Amino acid sequence: MLEIACFEITSAEIALQSSADRIEFCDEITLGGITPEIEEFKYLKEKFLKPIYVMIRPKGGGFFYDSAEFSAMIKSIELFKSWNADGFVFGILDENNEVDVERNTFLVELAKPVPCTFHRAFDRTKNLEKSCEKLIKIGFENVLTSGGEKTAKEGVENLKKLIEKYSDKINILIGGNVRSENIEFLKENTKGNFFHSSAIPSYEQFANDEEIRKLKRFSV
């Protein structure tokens, strides 16, 4: 399964017409992705059939949110759900950079039956295995991770362990500088089947169809 992270509408249109399986739609690549505009999402849903997972993140930076920011996340899920979002991507940590079980549970329940992905806030937690077990209990369908390291290639051993231990309970979505030149290595060394990439080549601004084709070929 290949998911393409799209930070603006041009990349989203390219990816939705490509061989990718779905996209993660968000805004502001410089902030690592925040909640996109509803009008852009509505346009994409009207034009394309491929699944669109929506990032629910009210601000860049850390993943601890105050009450107003949490309320904004609730409203965003309700809004995008009403316009048939295919999935949601979010992650809330507490003051100690651990999974906030209560708040994440609330949002997963609110989203049902729409599936949810816990994003790379996961990689900031101290114990990846304990955090993964929490996400499984909460009801997340996917966890996006680089194995606790800056890139998936650096976190390959941790990814392998997570996949061996938990892939029958939650999809381990491998992300973190995943490109066509390293996806074969990642697949071979982790035995993973779920990959996440922006598919933006060096010195380019948008997702690239040829890069997506290469990623898809090696991910299968």
Image: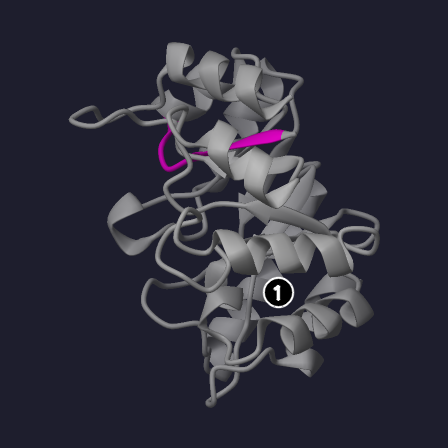
**Residue 155 appears left or right of 20:** left
Q: To which residue does mark 1 refer?
A: 74
**Badge 1 local density, few (<14 within 10 Å), some, or many (20+)?**
some
Q: Position of residue 55 (x, y in %)?
A: 52, 49
Give the overall secondary structure of the magenta segment.
Answer: strand
For the point 24% across and 49% down, the residue is 30
Q: For the C terminus, give its image quadrant.
A: top right
The stretch in magenta equals 2-9
Q: Is 6 a magenta residue?
A: yes
Q: Position of residue 97 (x, y in %)?
A: 47, 82
**Residue 75 appears left or right of 38:** right
Q: Is 114 a magenta residue?
A: no
For the point 52% across and 77% down, the residue is 93
Image height of 158 relative to 14, above or below: below
Image height of 117 relative to 203, above or below: below
What residue type is disc 1 on? Ile
Q: Secondary structure at mark 1?
A: helix
Q: Nearer the viewer, residue 27 or 154?
A: 154
Q: Position of residue 58 (x, y in %)?
A: 43, 62
